[in-house]
Image (spheres, rainbow, N blue to C red):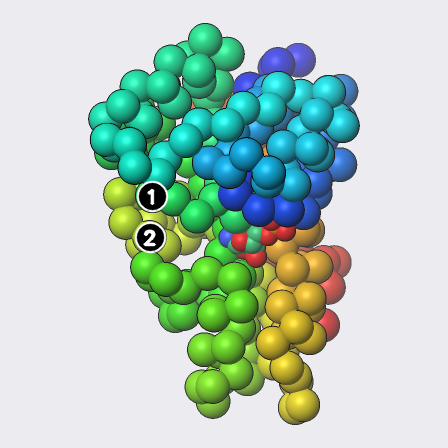
Amino acid sequence: MTPPVPAAVFASGSGTNLQALLDHETADGLYHIVVVISDREGAGALGRAEAAGRLARVIEVKGRPTEEVATETLSLLESLDVQAIFLAGYLRLIPPAVVSAYPRRILNIHPALLPAFGGKGMFGERVHEAVLASDVEVSGATVHYVDEEYDTGTIVGQWPVQVLPGDDISALAARVLSVEHRLYPAVADHVCEAWAEGRVPAPFALSPVEPGSD
Ligand code: GRF
């Protein structure tokens, strides 16, 4: 049996996607989260990591040179033999040195159907606000590889979500978030399985049994 891929999760916020990734993990699973890294001392994600018995670390980003952040990050990741990074509500750009040390090994989840409604400043409620201000009838969640920009890396998997008449930001956000919690662990398994078999992951497709269009 192939050992699970040692993974790091980066999170700035409450970490419900981290929790979904933790909850999905099994002893003989395809990935194992060995560390959770945040740029914020009080991030809820750090508490979730500790509650799950995982290493929780703060790496300050604000006001520090990018190279210094990269060196500290890489040294921690390498000491733990981390092979994959899952961004889950991490609000900072990943330093170029970290991106190049983990080519196509860093994933992010975004609460809309990229390439629409993404880019710098498009996070949290702002994404759903912009979706509601447009005339689209479908939003969703996207998992993509991470490059040096915000939300521009190659898309790995998406899950559409209906925008319903009368939706406000919190109703749409909740509907998308519940789909994120299912999409991210599924895509994490999908890419880790391909890596374990020495393949380049194919685009992730929702299986017909998954209620992706509800
Ligand atoms: C999610 O909506 C995710 O798509 C975005 O940030 C949010 C993080 O939420 N990148 P949580 O901290 O996982 O609850």
Q: Is mark 1 within 8 Å of ligand 1?
A: no
| Left or right of residue 173, residue 128 in this image | left
Q: Looking at the picture, does residue 69 appear above or below residue 14?
A: above
Looking at the rendered structure, the kind of residue marked 2 is Tyr
The spot of residue 75 in percent (x, y) is 38, 13
Q: Within the image, what quadrant is residue 34 found in?
A: top right
- Please rate how many residues cluster around mark 1, counting C-alpha atoms within 10 Å: few if below 14, some from 14 to 19, many from 20: some
SS category of the residue bearing label 1: loop
- Please rate how many residues cluster around mark 2, counting C-alpha atoms within 10 Å: few if below 14, some from 14 to 19, many from 20: some
Q: Say whether marks 1 and 2 touch (CB < 8 Å).
A: yes
| Left or right of residue 9, residue 151 in this image | left
90, 44: nearer the viewer: 44
**Residue 93 badge:** 1
Q: Within the image, what quadrant is residue 103 found in?
A: top left
Quadrant the C terminus occupies: bottom right
Q: Image point 41% across, 64% down: which residue? A: 122
Q: Within the image, what quadrant is residue 28 found in?
A: top right
Q: Looking at the picture, does residue 174 appear above or below residue 90?
A: below
SS category of the residue bearing label 2: loop
Number of marks in the rendered image: 2
The spot of residue 73 in percent (x, y) is 38, 22
Q: Image point 36% across, 35% down: which residue? A: 61
Cα distance, mark 1 to mark 2?
A: 7 Å
**Residue 31 badge:** none
99, 66: nearer the viewer: 66
Which residue is tagged 2? 150
Q: Image point 64% across, 82% down: which residue? A: 168
